[in-house]
Amino acid sequence: MIKTYSRKSVCVIDGQGGGIGSTIIKKIKDHFGESVEIIALGTNAIATAQMLKARANRGASGENAIVQTVARADVVVGTLGIMLAHAMMGEVTPKMAEAVSGCAATKLILPLSQENVDLIGVSEDPLPHLVETLVIDHLKPLIHACP
């Protein structure tokens, strides 16, 4: 009997203009190519469109898309705001934040926030360095782990 393994699914969640999500997706694609399925989940259509331009495999927008999709994901990636109700200028609804924080997926959260939240003891590295660390040190072991 031959075992077949499906690709791991990585949900990248972003809002507003989708710039951070796009940066994350480009780095994941550069490192893993098509060996992972990247699902762009935007709090709005503009963010989703930008992440799809960054080569996400699929994408969807809005509360229900995020709530339903993270429940089936292997990994969820985004900034701290995706776990905070009313973050991103109100784009993250309480249902979105609850779905992300409560889902079984491994969550890789970048310590960036426009909210009135400070994470103590976390480095203040620039976005490119944080994304590099996310992909190489945290996502790579998850992708290469046996299912």
Image (spheres, rainbow, N blue to C red):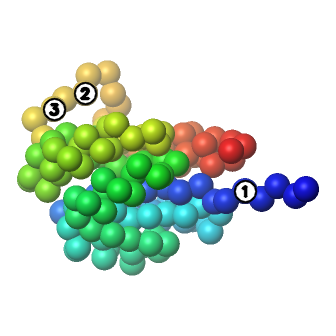
The residue at the point 30 percent across, 44 percent down is 99
Q: Secondary structure at mark 1?
A: loop
Disc 3 to disc 2, how far (Cα)? 7 Å
Residue 60, x across and y down, in percent? 33, 69
User: Which image quadrant: the N terminus?
Assistant: bottom right
Give the image quarter of residue 22. bottom left
Residue 97, x across and y down, in percent? 24, 43
| Number of residues whose C-alpha sits closer than 10 Å to that of mark 2, classed few (under 14), some (14–19) or many (20 or more) | few
Read off the residue under disc 2.
119
Q: Secondary structure at mark 3?
A: loop
Residue at the farthest front position: 1
Give the mark toward the camera: 1 or 3: 1
Q: Is residue 139 visible?
A: yes
Disc 1 to disc 3, how far (Cα)? 40 Å
Mark sitting earlier along the chain (1/2): 1
| Number of residues whose C-alpha sits closer than 10 Å to that of mark 1, classed few (under 14), some (14–19) or many (20 or more) | few
Question: In the depicted view, which residue is nearer to us: 15 or 6?
Answer: 6
* Mark drawn on residue 51: none
* Mark drawn on residue 5: 1
The residue at the point 82 percent across, 55 percent down is 3
Left or right: residue 45 versus residue 109 is: left
Read off the residue under disc 3.
117
Residue 41, x across and y down, in percent? 33, 62
Residue at the farthest top position: 121
Residue type indicated by callout 2:
Leu
Residue type indicated by callout 3:
Val
User: Which image quadrant: the C terminus?
Assistant: top right
Left or right: residue 119 versus residue 127 is: left
